[in-house]
Amino acid sequence: MNEKSAHTLELAKILAQLASFTSFSASMELAHNLTPTSYLDETQDRLQETTEARTLLENHDHITIGGARDVRRDVLAAERGVLLDPQILLDIRATLRQATTLRRILQRLHHQLPMIAAVADRLEECTALQNEISRVLDDTGQLFDSASPKLANVRREMRIAFDRLQSKLNNIVHNPNNTPYLQETLITQRHGRYVLPLRAEFKGRIPGIVHDQSASGATLFVEPLSTVDLNNTWRELQLEEENEIRRILRELCDMVGHEARFIVRTVETLAYLDLIFAKAKYADSLDATAPELVGFYDAPHPHPGSTIKLVQARHPLLDPDTVVPIDVELDEMTYVLVITGPNTGGKTVALKTVGLMILMAQCGLHLPAGNGSRLSIFDEVFVDIGDEQSIEQSLSTFSGHMTNIIDILEQADERSLVILDELGAGTDPAEGSALARSLLDDLTDRGITTLVTTHHPELKVYSHEKAGVRNASVEFNLETLAPTYRLIVGLPGRSNALAIAERLGLPQAIIERARGMVTDDDLEVDDLLDSIHKTRDEIFLTHEQTLRTQEHAEEMREELRLRLENIETERHTLLAQARQEAEQEIEALRSEIRRLRKRLQAAGQPLDIIKQIEQDSKYLDDDLIELPSPVTSVPGDDDNHRLRLGDLVWIRTLGTEGQITELTETDAEVSVGRLRLRAKLDELSHRSKSESKRDKKKPRYQPGESAASTAPARHPSPGLELDLRGQIVEDAIPTMEDYLDAAYMAGMPFVRIIHGKGTGALRSAIRDRLHGHPLVKSYERGGHKEGGDGVTVVKIVPQT
């Protein structure tokens, strides 16, 4: 890919942002050196790797390259026989450990992430080397005594010799006869030998060897003659220890050298994986999407068959809060786009956005654009943007542009993309316009996909008449006298000079005189463009209003759908309330009748009158009892009870208890905990409150208890939910296994496993175990009302 074009489009800044998401130096180097590829299949693989990495990090956010080090130089040095520092050996172990962890995790996910898993397969674990380093070195880089039998023996003898030496010196220091001769009652070291601080004036009072003296000369550091042999023994053992440590480290370095090519390959693979993860993190930070990459299709000559469609594309180096997205699409008849418009209107930014999007895609990066973007893969991208003048080479701006364009024309072909800014600028307008049209003729006739910007009005007509060429413009707001930076494909830009001058307050006489100097054809074209732009704005506003109306209609439709779903429940609730109120009124009337009977009897009325009143009250009682029966009660499988709203029922197919929340003639909706499910009436049986309380006192399934130990012959349900929150992975997995066994034996169709959100480690471990489990048909995250990512709904394999 053309390096000058990549520099002009500022690809290096994009790669620097990408490098900031890497974890260690090797992957950072890869990010800075990333180059676009011109091969379609390679680009698609790169994008797929980025997509898989985003999926991986979204579902397993604990995965990282942290701990890896770029140890390639040290490993190659060990291969040449260089003795490595213990800390470098620990870095090698840490890198291999991280590679081992990643390889095993990604191998388990190879069905979901085949591209990344294939990369991870290149990682080498070097298990023997890891174990040997762990056996020899502790986490601070010190050698264990057990590193070798000889080292253990030498260190044991060193401790004995040291204790004897210290004991002898302490006896000398604390001898009352020696105290007056000592500067201080302490033991110190000089040149690796233990000595005593003796006053210079008492030299010779303690026989020994002088090793040093203080700066003032008042203190001599003397090794007593009685400790010379002990000091020699201790020092000899120190040297022996150093030699044994060197020998052990040499053996470790030989092992590293033997595994050098595997370790180097592992570091390079880790760096590549980290680069893929960095692409995913960068894409998330840009809210980017993966474009669809397509090859060059067969098109009538001279159309090259290229495709450029960018939806709501945003330049990634601009402030995301203020950048204006652009839509760019070359239809099947267009492969050259001519953009016109005022200065600082966004023409150059539009060119850079398109060019940079293509380079980013060919680097395997997701694009800061909307869904639906489609791009061809170009062999080369040639760019001429900016001021090309050079004082050293005596080139003017025009000469600089022409030199660059000549190079582009020599190298470009139908598989190239050419981007030219301010074509024909920097010289006489008439000649510049003619030269620009001639250059466009050449590029168009050669079938080269081209994007250009220009100020020459003649190119507006040229773009309208030339096959394969299309106009575009950047929008300008005459009310605010500022560009909107929106790109409009299909319309040329308007000449706004007179309108801007009038808005700014230039005298009307001058404006009218200037207008008279403009040809009638130019004025008519400008008026026509103004009318087209106004019509387009009106259509756009109408379209926006239509979209808002559609959105409102969809909202109303969803609201009505929800109300229709709830209307049956509301109807049953109202009927139940009416039934309850009627029964209360009936009971009140019955009480009144009983009271009246008692009063009549007490009043001593004739017997025939009392009987007549009783007969009338009986008719009234019968009329009250014969109320129409609502649909809140239907026959159940128990002839002695009719199912009603709110009844407790036993669901035989699930072996669990629930409460009826909705009732029809054939089935019912039953609430079980937080779940709601529909069951046929013949699957339900009524449960009294006493039966429910009695069952709740029975021992339920406990996590950790096998299904066989608690299940009678009919295998009762272990419950629809298993709460594992607060448990560590090592305890939660066996508990879940027992629970799944019990759920399968009970014939349950699905269960819910509550693991919480937290760091996501428990959720990942549970879902990894569920994947491929023989009793699990499928699993998915809980719904919005079920706990979301904190819950996994598991569908159980049916019993055969």
Image: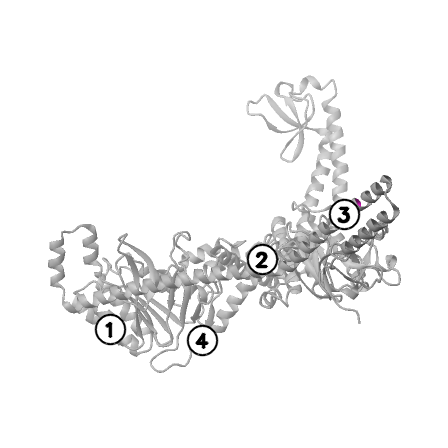
Residue sitting at x 14%, y 67% = 519
Q: Which SS class for mark 4?
A: loop
Q: Does any portion of residue 255 appear in the rendered image?
A: no
Q: Amino acid at mark 1?
A: Tyr
Looking at the image, residue 108 sits to the left or right of residue 717; the answer is left
Q: Which residues are magenta?
A: 586-591
- The residue to which callout 3 is attached is 589
- The residue to which callout 1 is attached is 462
Q: Nearer the viewer, mark 1 or mark 2?
A: 1
Q: Earlier in the sequence, mark 1 or mark 2?
A: 2
The crowding category of the residue bearing disc 3, from other C-alpha atoms within 10 Å (few below 14, some 14 to 19, many at least 20), is: some
- The residue to which callout 4 is attached is 295
Q: Nearer the viewer, mark 4 or mark 1?
A: 1
- The residue to which callout 2 is attached is 58
Q: Amino acid at mark 4?
A: Gly
Cβ atoms under marks 1 and 2 closer than 8 Å: no
Cβ atoms under marks 4 and 2 closer than 8 Å: no
Residue sitting at x 38%, y 59% = 10
Q: Earlier in the sequence, mark 4 or mark 2?
A: 2
Magenta residue check for 587: yes
Question: Which quadrant of the figure contains the C terminus?
Answer: bottom right
- On the image, the x and y values in percent for residue 196 come to 67, 26
Q: Does any portion of residue 239 appear in the rendered image?
A: yes
The crowding category of the residue bearing disc 4, from other C-alpha atoms within 10 Å (few below 14, some 14 to 19, many at least 20), is: some
Q: Amino acid at mark 2?
A: Glu
Question: Which quadrant of the figure contains the N terminus?
Answer: bottom left
Label 1 to label 2: alpha-carbon separation: 50 Å
